[in-house]
Structure formats: structure tokens, C-alpha cells
Image (cartoon, rainbow, N blue to C red):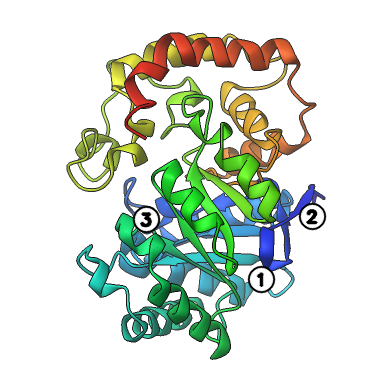
């Protein structure tokens, strides 16, 4: 196995790789994935130094969790920290975020993953009011006391939600969309997390593939791919698909971003390297549908830091092409 830089994931006290493995795509929400192919991807990630998997109980209605559980049973040599999520199995109403539901959702995830205690459970982008509820955090503390979970965290859509959660003493980490097309978390969220000792997990790091530079205006996505059916938030939050950017705008900006890639690095690796070196980021969790993608993602951790000139160019591109469209919305 290749060694990769490890960083402490906030208040969990556990170290995880700076490049993790997002597993949304293993559930089938990006197109069908065979189990053997999923295991090959996870093998490639682990052998490349990844020690952190991120999943959720609704990815493929639990299929992603189940695949990870079966995979880790077959790889006892892999010391993997698994973060899952809960909350999206019920109507998105604050009154559904109660202890009885938490226990039910936890029991299902524990069975899917084949563990007694979940490493980390994140509230899965719940209604905004949930982040301010004392009762919700009391219930999460109870889950820790019952040893159903070792720690809890939140996944958020907005910077305001992140800041509310960071102020809570039991929140171990915050998962938030962060990439060269989504810079707003840099202003307040990351500094607040550093000050509080809260970890930051960066999701949607490639803006659903836009930053890979592989797509064109004529690219067609399958009917079961969220990049086809959720471009305007028809199924879930718009920010989860192309970071909420209009597809045509994103394609044009991605072509400019690709020109910033240093010699020997792909645009996707450049985007991941940009995220890794943002102060406060613990881990970035790109997805992968192939062995080659998993290895390339992990290799971004070994790239040298991007120079200030590149960081300035990313900011200029964002301010000129992206900011007006997404900054106010999130």
C-alpha cells in the first residue's frame, strides 16, 4: 500500500487520508455499477493510500453501505474509517429528526456495514432548523452513550448551516461543497472550523465531473444519472449537481480551469490539489467509477502545492465567471 498524508478528522481524534473515497456512485445514482467493479475501485483506492470512505444510508437505498461492509469483511488488512449519513429516509421535516428515528436509521446502517458501532454518522443535509435544535444534539449524544456511534457530524448545503453546527461542542466535522467553482466556504467556514477544532470534509470536489475537463456541451448523461435529472434541483438540492452551476457556464469555465493544470497533472488532480491545500480541510472525497480514476484521485495527494499564481488565477476565474451565479444562493 502507498502511504498518504493523514490528518486528524476534527473531534473524532482519528486520522484519515487527505484524499478519501466518496461512494455515492457505488449506490447506482450515477449509473449502474457491478459489485465486482465497485470492489476493484475500492481496492485501487485502498492500495493507493486511502483510509477514509464516505457513504450514506440512501446511496442506492443502502447498496453503497452494503458494498463497503462486504468489501471490508474481505479486506481485514485495510484500516478504513467509514463515515455514513442519516436523515434522508424520511420526509424532510424537523419533527422527523428524533431519537427513535435515529436509532432505527442507525440499526439499518450498522447492519449494512456489518459493525456494532459506526465510526461517524453525519446528519444528511437536514432542514435548516435541525442545526439549531438542542433536542437533536441531545439525541446524538445519546447515540454516542449507547455506543451505536463513535462520533457525529453534519453535512450541510449552506455556510450559515455550517457555522451553526461548528458552534456545537459535540460536532466532530462538517461536510460541505468546496471546489474551485465554490469558494464561499473559504471566507468564514474554514477559519471557524480551524478555531473550533472541527474537521472539514470537502464534497463535490470536481463539480460533478465538470472540473475533470472531460465533458462538452454535447455530452449526454444516462437517464439514471443525477447529472441528467437534477440540473435544476428537481430531485434534491441543486448544489449537489455541477455545484449548482448552469451546465454551459460550467463547461466554459472548466475549459479555462484546465489550462491552469501544472505539467504532469490532470485538471481533476489540480482541483483536488487546490482543495487539499486550503487551510482547515481535513479530507476531500472524490468519487470514482473506475480503477484508473481512483488511482488518479489518490495521486493528487502527492502533487506539490500549487503556486500562488495558480491560486490567484482560480480566484479570478471564479469572480469573473461563477461568483454572480452561485455566491448569493449558497
Write the residue at 44% across / 31% down.
209
- Where is residue 282 shown, x and y percent of the image? 67, 48
Are the two marked residues, 3 and 1, in contact with CB atoms closer than 8 angstroms? Answer: no
Earlier residue among tags 2 and 3: 2
Disc 2 to disc 3, C-alpha distance: 34 Å
Under tag 3, what secondary structure? loop
Residue 216 in sight in this render: no
Please give the residue where the numbered disc 1 appears in the rendered image.
75
Q: Label 2 neighbourhood size at 10 Å, few (<14), some (14-19), many (20+)?
A: few
- Where is residue 217 drawn, in percent x and y? 29, 15
Crowdedness near tag 3: few (<14), some (14–19) or many (≥20) residues, C-alpha within 10 Å: many
SS at circle 2:
loop
Circle 2 or circle 3, nearest the eye: 3
Q: Which mark is residue 1?
A: 2
Mark yes or no: residue 221 visible. Answer: yes
Q: Quadrant of residue 328?
A: top left
Cα distance, mark 1 to mark 2?
Answer: 13 Å
Q: Secondary structure at mark 1?
A: loop
**Can you say whether 177 is above or below 329 in the image?**
below
Q: Quadrant of the N terminus?
A: bottom right
Callout 1 environment at 10 Å: few (<14), some (14 to 19), or many (20+)? few
Above-or-below relation of 126 to 162: below
Amino acid at each position: 500500500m502507498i502511504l498518504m498524508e493523514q490528518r486528524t478528522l476534527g473531534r473524532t481524534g482519528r486520522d484519515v487520508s487527505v484524499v478519501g473515497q466518496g461512494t455515492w456512485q457505488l449506490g447506482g445514482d450515477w449509473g449502474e455499477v457491478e459489485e465486482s467493479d465497485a470492489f476493484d475501485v475500492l481496492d485501487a483506492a485502498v492500495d493507493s493510500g486511502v483510509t477514509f470512505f464516505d457513504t450514506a444510508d440512501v446511496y442506492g437505498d443502502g447498496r453503497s453501505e452494503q458494498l463497503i461492509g462486504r468489501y471490508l469483511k474481505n479486506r481485514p488488512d485495510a484500516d478504513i474509517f467509514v463515515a455514513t449519513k442519516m436523515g434522508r429516509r424520511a420526509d424532510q421535516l424537523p419533527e422527523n429528526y428524533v431519537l427513535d428515528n435515529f436509532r432505527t436509521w442507525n440499526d439499518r446502517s450498522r447492519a449494512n456495514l456489518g459493525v456494532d458501532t459506526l465510526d461517524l454518522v453525519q446528519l444528511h443535509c437536514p432542514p435548516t432548523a435541525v442545526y439549531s435544535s438542542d433536542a437533536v444534539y441531545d439525541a446524538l449524544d445519546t447515540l454516542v452513550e449507547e455506543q451505536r456511534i463513535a462520533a457525529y457530524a453534519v453535512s450541510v448545503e449552506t455556510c450559515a448551516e455550517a457555522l451553526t453546527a461548528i458552534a456545537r461542542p459535540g460536532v466532530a466535522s462538517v461536510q460541505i461543497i468546496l471546489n474551485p467553482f465554490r469558494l464561499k466556504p473559504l471566507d468564514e467556514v474554514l477559519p471557524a472550523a480551524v478555531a473550533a477544532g472541527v474537521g472539514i470534509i470537502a464534497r463535490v470536489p470536481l463539480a460533478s465531473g465538470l472540473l475533470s475537463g472531460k465533458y462538452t456541451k454535447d455530452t449526454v448523461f444516462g437517464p439514471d444519472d443525477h447529472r441528467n435529472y437534477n440540473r435544476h434541483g428537481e430531485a434534491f438540492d441543486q448544489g449537489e449537481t455541477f455545484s449548482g452551476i448552469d451546465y454551459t457556464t460550467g463547461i466554459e469555465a472548466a475549459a479555462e480551469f484546465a489550462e491552469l493544470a501544472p505539467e504532469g497533472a490532470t485538471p481533476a488532480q489540480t482541483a483536488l490539489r487546490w482543495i487539499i491545500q486550503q487551510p482547515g480541510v481535513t479530507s476531500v472525497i472524490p468519487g470514482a467509477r473506475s480503477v484508473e480514476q481512483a488511482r488518479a484521485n489518490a495521486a493528487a495527494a502527492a502533487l506539490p502545492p500549487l503556486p500562488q499564481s495558480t491560486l490567484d488565477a482560480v480566484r479570478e476565474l471564479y469572480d469573473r465567471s461563477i461568483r454572480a451565479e452561485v455566491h448569493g444562493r449558497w
